[in-house]
Image (spheres, helix red, strand yellow):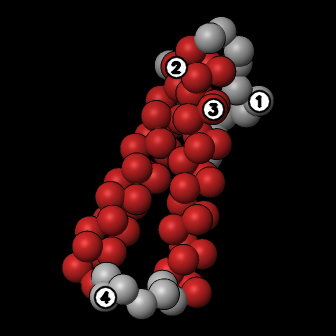
Amino acid sequence: MSYDQEAAEALCNDLFTTASALSHVRNELNNQYSGKPLEPGFRNLLLTLIDRNQELVDEVLSYMEGQKPTEVPA
């Protein structure tokens, strides 16, 4: 597998992972929401996942537009 293929696959896998985690968090919110403020840890987790998902979307879009990622994610 070439560098480009490895990088693209790694980006897509990471994006799928964060999207899956966000889906899980959404389900937890649906099950537990009672109109009260979110616990600080839960809120931070949600914000971290959203930020990481946005970073990955930006990387995937850059890759699709012909810009190579800076490194192959581990």
Q: Which residue is mark 3?
A: 58
23 vs 71, left or right, is: left
Q: Residue furthest front?
A: 35
Give the residue type that dot 4 points to.
Answer: Ser
Give the residue type that dot 1 points to.
Answer: Thr
Of helix, strand and loop, which one carries label 3? helix
Q: Which residue is mark 4?
A: 34
Label 4 Cα crowd, 10 Å radius (few <14 / some 14-19 / many 20+): few
Please tell me which of labels 3 and 1 falls first in the chain. Answer: 3
Which of the 4 quarters of the picture holds residue 24? bottom left
Q: Residue furthest top?
A: 66
Q: Nearer the viewer, mark 4 or mark 2?
A: 4
Give the residue type that dot 3 points to.
Answer: Asp
Q: Residue furthest right?
A: 70
Please tell me which of labels 2 and 3 falls first in the chain. Answer: 2
Please tell me which of labels 1 and 2 falls first in the chain. Answer: 2
The residues bearing labels 3 and 4 have C-alpha atoms spaced at a distance of 34 Å
Q: Nearer the viewer, mark 1 or mark 4?
A: 4
Q: Nearer the viewer, mark 2 or mark 3?
A: 3
Which of the 4 quarters of the picture holds residue 16? top left
In this picture, is 51 found above or below 57?
A: below
Q: Which residue is mark 1?
A: 70
The residues bearing labels 1 and 2 have C-alpha atoms spaced at a distance of 14 Å
Q: Is residue 2 visible?
A: no
Give the residue type that dot 2 points to.
Answer: Gln
Query: Could you say which disc has been placed on residue 5 in the image?
Result: 2
